[in-house]
Amino acid sequence: MEALKVVFDMETQDPDDFLTLLLLLGHPRIDLRAVTVTPGSQAQVGVVRYALSCFEVDIPVGAYNINHPKTCVSPWHYRAYGNIPPSCDAREGHEVLAENCDEKTTLITGAALKNVGRAIKNNSLKVKKLVAQGGFAGEGVVPKYLQMEKFKGKKTCPTFNLNGDRKSALAVLEYSGIPRRYFVSKNVCHRVLYDQDLHKQVRVVRKRSKALNMMYLGMDIYLQKRSHKKLHDPLAACCAITPLIGQWEEVELFYAKGEWGSRLASGSNTWIIVDYNHALFLETFLAY
C-alpha cells in the first residue's frame, strides 16, 4: 500500500499535538513531508525539531510567527522529554505549506488555521483533502442516541481551533484549492481517551516502535497526575489514515455568536464526524 503523503499543522500547548507528531513520524502508512506550527515561537520550533531529530528526519518546518513573545509550549513537554532547546530553524509557515502540499497531499490540522489562512490568502495552497480537528456536530446532524450527555440538544458549541482564527476557518470552507474537507469534531473527540487501559496496550507494543515508545514515556508522566487525556488530534490523524474509522455526514459548517455548528448539506464537499469505530481507531493508532 502506497504511503499517505501528509503535511501536519500543529500547536504545542496541548500534549496531544505532540503525540500526533510522533504518530505521523512513526506510522508505517505515513509519508510526512513537512510540519508547520502555530503561533510558531522558537520554543515550539525547538520541540518540533527535537521530535524530527529523534527519528533522524529532516523535513521543512514552518512557523506563523517565529518571533512570537510567548513560548506556547506546555510544561508537560519538558517534564516528559527534558530540556528541549529553542530553535530558529523554520521558514514562513504559509510558504512551507505552499511548497510541500499538492493535489496528492492530505493536510492534517490540529491548531488554529493561521498558517492555512495565510496560504489561502496568497492563493498558493493546493491539497487533495483537509482533515481538521475542530468544529461541532449536534442536534439535527447527530442522532440523539449518539449525542454525549454534555452536548445533548445543542446545535452549536465553541471550538478552540476554529475560533483561534475565525476568518481563516471560514476561508477554508470556501477555498477551491481544498476540494474535500473532513472535520473531526469535539462531539466525538471527547469520547476518545488515552487512559490507563490504552496505556497498557501501548506498553505491550512500545518496544516495536520508536513512536509508540516515546508516546508511552510521555504519557507515563502525564498519567501520574491525571486519569486520562482526550485524543483530539490523534483521532484526526487516524481518520486521515483510515477514513472508515469515522461515520461521516456531509454538512455545511456555520459560525454564530462565538460558536460553531453544522447542518446537513448534500454537495458541500465538507464532512463532519458523528461516530467512530473504536477497534479500528486502536488498530490504526497502535500500528508499527
Image (tube, rainbow, N blue to C red):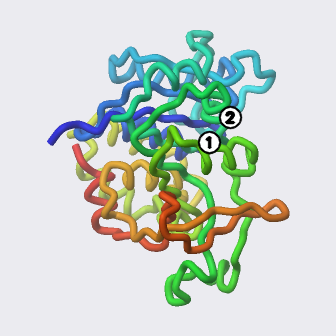
Q: 10 Å neighbourhood of mark 1: few (<14), some, or many (≥20)?
A: many
Per the image, the residue denoted by label 2 is 114
| Quarter of the rendering containing residue 9 | top right
Q: Where's the N terminus, which quadrant?
A: top left
Q: Which is nearer the eye, 7 or 17?
A: 7
* Residue at image coords 56%, 74%: 264
Per the image, the residue denoted by label 1 is 111
In the picture as drawn, the residue positioned furthest to the bottom comes out as 145
Mark 2 near mark 1, Cβ–Cβ under 8 Å?
A: yes
Of helix, strand and loop, which one carries label 2? helix
Q: Is residue 219 visible?
A: no
- Check disc 2 and give the amino acid type: Lys
The percent position of residue 56, horizontal first and vertical second, equals 33, 17
The percent position of residue 79, horizontal first and vertical second, equals 58, 34
| Quarter of the rendering containing residue 246 | bottom left
Separation (CA) of disc 2 from disc 1: 8 Å
In the image, residue 57 sits, relative to residue 267, either above or below, namely above
Q: Is residue 233 left or right of residue 78?
A: left
The percent position of residue 2, horizontal first and vertical second, equals 18, 38
Foreground mark, 2 or 1?
Answer: 2
